[in-house]
Amino acid sequence: MPLALDIIKNVPHLASRAQLFGARSNDGFTGWDDQKEVLDERSGVTAWTLHDIRRTVATGLADIGVQPHIIEQVLNHQSGHKGGPAGIYNRSSYEREVRNALALWGHGRRAQGCLLRSSLASRRLLMPGAAAW
């Protein structure tokens, strides 16, 4: 399965805009609420908020041992280790650490997906005619 960055790099770029996702804007990704509504419709799941994703990723990264200051950088938070005087003097983007943390997160999600597919396949073999859930 290709990494997200590989997929993004292979999407054709429009000469008129730098953003890959969202509405035409020079302010980065826009239209979060509109896109959530589309995802809700397509998935049939509506009882969640965009912050649930941030909370899930932050908790998951902490659970696999990513340091809190790297999690804050992943979330683009400017508090904690970058608040106050430390933020004035420490200008690091922690790019390497953020990439490593997101790679770990991605590998864990793929592994969970494989385990879930394997589990569902086993259930169908053990219980013919049972619906996958």
Image: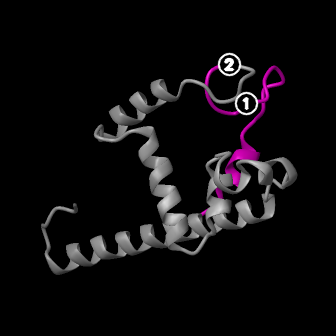
The residue positioned 46% from the left and 52% from the top of the image is 55
Quadrant in the picture for residue 122: bottom left
Q: Amino acid at mark 1?
A: Gln
Image location (x, y in percent) of residue 57:
51, 57
Residue placed most toward the observer, 27 or 115: 27
- Residue 51 image point, x, y percent: 45, 42
Dot 2 crowding, Cα within 10 Å, few <14, some 14–19, many 20+:
some
- Looking at the rendering, in which quadrant would you find the C terminus? bottom left
Query: Closer to the N terminus: mark 1 or mark 2?
Result: 1
Q: Which residues are magenta?
A: 1-24
Mark 2: amino acid: Arg
As drawn, 54 above or below 38: below
Residue ID for mark 2? 24
Q: Secondary structure at mark 1?
A: loop
Give above or below for 33 relative to 53: above
Q: Provide residue 8's location: percent of width, then percent of height.
A: 70, 46
Q: Residues within 10 Å of mark 1 (few under 14, many from 20)?
A: some
The disc placed on residue 72 is: none
Above or below, 77 against 57 in this view is above
User: Looking at the image, which residue is at 79% across and 58% down?
Assistant: 95
Q: Are the residues at dot 1 and dot 2 in contact (C-beta closer than 8 Å)?
A: yes
Residue 110 visible in the shown view: no
| Camera-nearest residue between 73 and 111 | 73
Query: Could you tell me if residue 111 is visible in this image?
Result: yes
Q: Could you say where residue 31 lies in the image, as x and y percent from the top left?
A: 54, 24
Distance, label 1 to label 2, CA atoms, is 8 Å
Q: Main secondary structure of the magenta part?
A: loop
Left or right: where 126 falls relative to 63: left
Question: Of the numbered discs in the image, which one, if any, rests on residue 19?
Answer: 1
The residue tagged with tag 2: helix, strand or loop? Answer: loop
**Residue at point 87%, 52% (across, down):** 89
In the picture provided, is 90 more to the left or to the right than 23? right
